[in-house]
Image (spheres, rainbow, N blue to C red):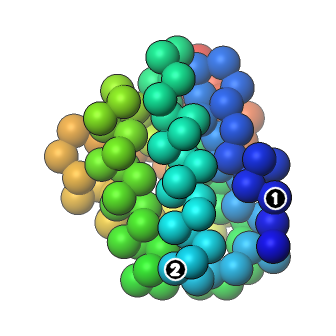
Amino acid sequence: MIDLTEVLYVDGNVLIAEFPEEMEMTDETFAKVNERFEELASQPAVDTHISNLQMEASLNDDVFSRAQEAAEAGKEFGITDWVIVSEGIKKMALKSQVGEIPGVDISLVDTRAEAMDIAAN
């Protein structure tokens, strides 16, 4: 099991989710991710979320459903800007699902550095 304190953390105004290559793509895993997300999202300075998608496995319906839940929860805490980082098609697939949540703005980038630049502005 992956240590969620290393996967999800806050850096300044940004709640960062670093999904590693070996990340399990199960509903149980992402339920725990969402619990951690909500704990961190409540910090007053946080206004942006970065999802860095490094996992090898394809995204599935459970992941999409949990991502939508996280976006809804994030909105309650004032997190309306999401930056999705991936070199492949995963970022577009996730955007198609999270982008369905009214009031959540999505940016797609190829690198974490680009994501941090967006979050800083």
Taking the image as drawn, is residue 34 in sight? yes
The residue that mark 2 highlights is 27
Q: Please, is residue 98 above or below residue 109 in the view?
A: below
The residue that mark 1 highlights is 3
Q: Residue furthest left?
A: 102
- Report helix, strand or loop for mark 2: helix
Q: Nearer the viewer, residue 95 or 61?
A: 61
Q: Disc 1 or 2, which lies upstream in sequence?
A: 1
Taking the image as drawn, is residue 89 in sight? no
* Marker disc for residue 18: none
- Report helix, strand or loop for mark 1: loop
Quarter of the image where the N terminus is located: bottom right
Amino acid on which the number 1 mark rests in the picture = Asp
Tell me if mark 1 has few (under 14), some (14-19) or many (20+) residues whose alpha carbon lies within 10 angstroms of its own: few
Left of 116 or right of it: where is 6? Answer: right
The x, y position of residue 84, in whole percent, is: 54, 50
The x, y position of residue 64, in whole percent, is: 41, 72
Q: Residue at x 81, y 58 (%)?
A: 3
Q: Nearer the viewer, residue 61 or 91?
A: 61
Q: Residue at x 81, y 49 (%)?
A: 6
